[in-house]
Image (spheres, rainbow, N blue to C red):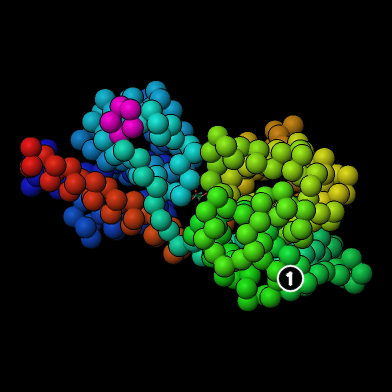
Amino acid sequence: MSPSEPPRITAYGCGPDEAALFRRAAAESGVAVTVTHTAPSEATAALAAGSRCVSVGHQARLTAAVLRALRQAGVEYVSTRSVGRDHIDVAYAERIGIAVENVSYSPDSVADHTLMLMLMSVRNAQSTVRRVDDHDYRLPEARGRELRDLTVGIVGTGRIGAAVADRLRGFGCRLLAHDRRPRIAAEHVPLDELLRLSDIVTLHTPLTAETRHLLDRRRIALMKPGAYLVNTGRGPLVDTDALIAALESGRLGGAALDVVEGEEGVFYADRRAGPAAGEPLLRLQKLPNVLITPHTAYYTDRALRDMVENSLANCLHHRSDHESRTRAT
Ligand code: COI
């Protein structure tokens, strides 16, 4: 491709709203964009021919085989429209000459949702709304707790964890935080201590080999009796079997989960015709003290726009870096 040709990028896995945003943003920035709803795979890698940069969604599974196919199609750069990169074999990508970057988007989307889940949990909102739907308007079961009387433990204090902390300060609760690198104004404590002291534990740490099952059986057993777990990070941060046992026994007060182990292929699908049995999700959904949202915490108009525009901008930035490197040689 000559430098005067418009840059081309392929945007995989786009829902209708992302597709419309991509087309608009691409037209505004003079980029030729191939927008497809299909996921990147060995079979669809050819769609990336002519695009040095591709944008993928967080549901894409970029295994070594898929990355190899993309590389063969000429891809040098992958921008994932998510903060998490756990769906991509980043080490392999780098080994074969593909750079991988995430995008930043409004952390307020996830932070607002996290606060909503916390408030719904401590005010028993789900069961109250369900009872009202059944015309049961009695009072006692609805009694809740006030956030200012509670201690909230934030695990992971990056942009989203920090935005959650900002909101919680307004509620006057005691804030504990755990991170390898203290980044917010809060009482920073070791993880086990945070679990022992918190009435609500909220997870905002990336999923890596080290953080898989960060909340394992031992750590869940450390949590305060009656405590709530809020997870808007990644499902595998929590050992789901251990969580279910703690919820069933009544040791934990409840869980509000936007992410669940094994959600791939289930969340965002219409399963009304008959959900498959035995999935951890179904076991969780049967529990009265569990509130599930299907990985929608990020999904606001602003965050979606940020994701698409920043993914495109990252691709263009990579391309101009590439061109200046090529001109210099
Ligand atoms: C992330 O940004 O990593 C998320 O989990 C949101 C994603 C579904 C776009």
Q: Residue at left 28%, top 58%?
A: 25
Q: Quadrant of residue 304?
A: bottom left
Where residue 35 appears, as percent x and y from the top left, is: 32, 44
Q: Residue at left 78%, top 72%?
A: 149
Q: Residue at left 35%, top 40%?
A: 100
Q: Label 1 neighbourhood size at 10 Å, few (<14), some (14-19), many (20+)?
A: many
Q: Is residue 78 visible?
A: yes
**Residue hosting label 1:** 147
Task: Check disc 1 and give the amino acid type.
Answer: Leu
Q: Is residue 271 visible?
A: no
Q: In the structure shown, which secondary structural element does the residue marked by tag 1 occupy?
A: helix
Q: Is residue 27 above or below residue 136?
A: above
- The quarter of the rendered structure image containing the C terminus is top left
The answer to if 72 sits in the magenta stretch is no
Q: Nearer the viewer, residue 310 or 205?
A: 205
Instruction: Judge from the rendering whether residue 203 lies leftward or rightward of residue 141; answer left or right.
Output: left
Q: Is residue 110 above or below residue 329?
A: below
- The quarter of the rendered structure image containing the N terminus is top left
Q: Is residue 188 above or below residue 16?
A: below
Q: Which residues are magenta?
A: 94-98
Q: Residue at left 62%, top 47%?
A: 259
Where residue 298 appears, as percent x and y from the top left, is: 52, 56
